[in-house]
Amino acid sequence: MKKKKYKPVEGDIFKYLITDGAVNDGFTICGYGRVLNSMTAAFYSNYALPPRKVGFVATVEHVLILDVAFVVGCTFDGFDNGNYDVIGNVPLENKFKKPIQFYHRAFGKTECRIFNIWDSDKETSMDIRKVPVHIEHWGAYSHVHVEQRLGIYRANEDA
């Protein structure tokens, strides 16, 4: 039977195993994310939660108290290949309803587009050298890219 393709639902909270479910001393580490819209997800800094015994799944309440590590454009392939698993759905809080900006630059250009995920029709152009550092580069992160980025995020937190 063919697996049904996941359709992103705003507010879905999902878990995924980090490093393909690697188990260390009887513990496994899960990451958590949140669907913001059909193209974007927030990924949580799950390192505030200690590793849990194999089989432990954080509740939605556990996840909602975590800090957001980053928000990126996603392919959501993690759902289709079974790496992401929805554990609940909660309406988005106000912090996610505020403008979330990204920039996109065509290869070889110095100008880039800056847009808000909630209103992508209204965009501005800016020289790439003047884009504020807090604005993320738009891209389609796969589950592998997200895991790599969380590893970098954790290393920076530990430094």
Image: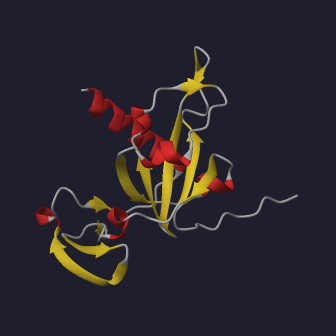
- Foreground residue, 64 or 6? 64
Q: Quadrant of the N terminus?
A: bottom right
Residue 67 location, quadrant: top left
Measuring from the top left, give residue 124's x and y in whole percent: 21, 80
What residue sits 43% from the left and 38% below the top?
A: 46
Vertical placement of residue 20 versus 71, above or below: above
Looking at the rendering, in which quadrant would you find the C terminus?
A: top left
Give the percent coordinates (x, y) of residue 85: 64, 49
Q: Give the quarter of the image for residue 156.
A: top left
85 over 138 or under it: above or below: above
Q: Is residue 69 above or below residue 121?
A: above
Looking at the image, which residue is at 35% across and 51% down? Answer: 70
Could you tell me how many numbered marks the image carries? Answer: 0
Question: Which colour style is shown?
Answer: secondary structure
Res 128 → quadrant:
bottom left
**Residue farthest to the left?**
130
Q: Is residue 120 left or right of residue 114?
A: right
Furthest residue in direction front, as rendered: 61
Farthest bottom residue?
Answer: 121
Answer with left or right where residue 27 lies relative to residue 121. Answer: right
State the image coordinates of residue 45 (x, y, percent, origin top left).
39, 41
Outermost right residue: 1
Q: Is residue 75 left or right of residue 155?
A: right
Q: Residue at x 59, y 26 (%)?
A: 22
Q: Residue at x 51, y 40 (%)?
A: 31
- List x then y, in percent, for residue 105: 28, 68
Residue 77 falls left or right of residue 70: right
